[in-house]
Amino acid sequence: MTTADVHDAKAAPALLETFMDHSGRLLKLVWVDRAYQGPALAEAFARHGVRVEVVRRLDGQHGFVVLARRWVVERTLSQLFRSRRLNRDHERRLDHHAQMVCWAAVIRLPRRLAADAPRWPEKRPGRLLRTRA
């Protein structure tokens, strides 16, 4: 994590190195927008064998247009910031904030998985709803 006055594209090479230094980390493909094009970042991605695809607008497009894969980051951030701790309480230390983001993701994942799980009685064939006599 970096301070707010550092643009993401400038901080990305160092963050990528920090991320990839941990064992078991595997990153194969990254979708970026035009701001993430630069020699330092390209070199960092190439050093780790990461393929980069730049998501661009079509020529002549004006106004709001949904671009493929661009919405994934915004959706994930909005889902994480539903957590009250991330939205209201501001941590003093970066490592505490990073752990709160991890906790919010850990809490969100089983809820997302459970959304696909069958619910009783509507989605479980063979089960009848008992009525009270």
Image (cartoon, helix red, strand yellow):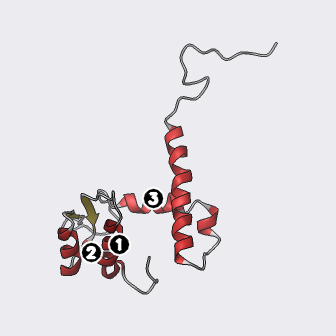
Q: Nearer the viewer, mark 1 or mark 2?
A: 1
Give the residue pinned by disc 1. Answer: 18
CB under 8 Å between callouts 1 and 2? no
Residue shown at 82% from the left, 12% from the top: 133
Dot 1: what SS?
helix
Residue 6: name its quadrant.
bottom left
Closest to the observer: 20 or 79? 20
Residue shown at 65% from the left, 72% from the top: 89
Disc 2: CA contacts within 10 A as few (<14), some (14-19) or many (>=20) = some
Q: Alpha-carbon distance for marks 2 and 3?
A: 19 Å
Residue 18: name its quadrant.
bottom left
Give the residue pinned by disc 2. Answer: 36
Above or below for 121 versus 20: above
Q: Alpha-carbon distance for marks 1 and 2?
A: 18 Å
Q: Please tell me which of labels 3 and 1 falls first in the chain.
A: 1
Q: Please tell me which of labels 2 and 3 falls first in the chain.
A: 2
Give the residue type that dot 1 points to: Thr
Q: Nearer the viewer, mark 3 or mark 1?
A: 1
Give the residue type that dot 3 points to: Thr
Dot 2: what SS?
helix
Disc 1: CA contacts within 10 A as few (<14), some (14-19) or many (>=20) = few
Give how far across and how far down residue 68 sits, in percent.
Answer: 29, 56
Question: Residue furthest toward the right?
Answer: 133
Q: Alpha-carbon distance for marks 3 and 1?
A: 22 Å
Above or below for 5 versus 25: below
- Quadrant that contains the N terminus: bottom left
Closest to the observer: 131 or 24? 24
Give the residue type that dot 2 points to: Tyr
Give the residue pinned by disc 3. Answer: 76
Dot 3: what SS?
helix
Give how far across and how far down residue 76 sits, in percent.
Answer: 45, 58
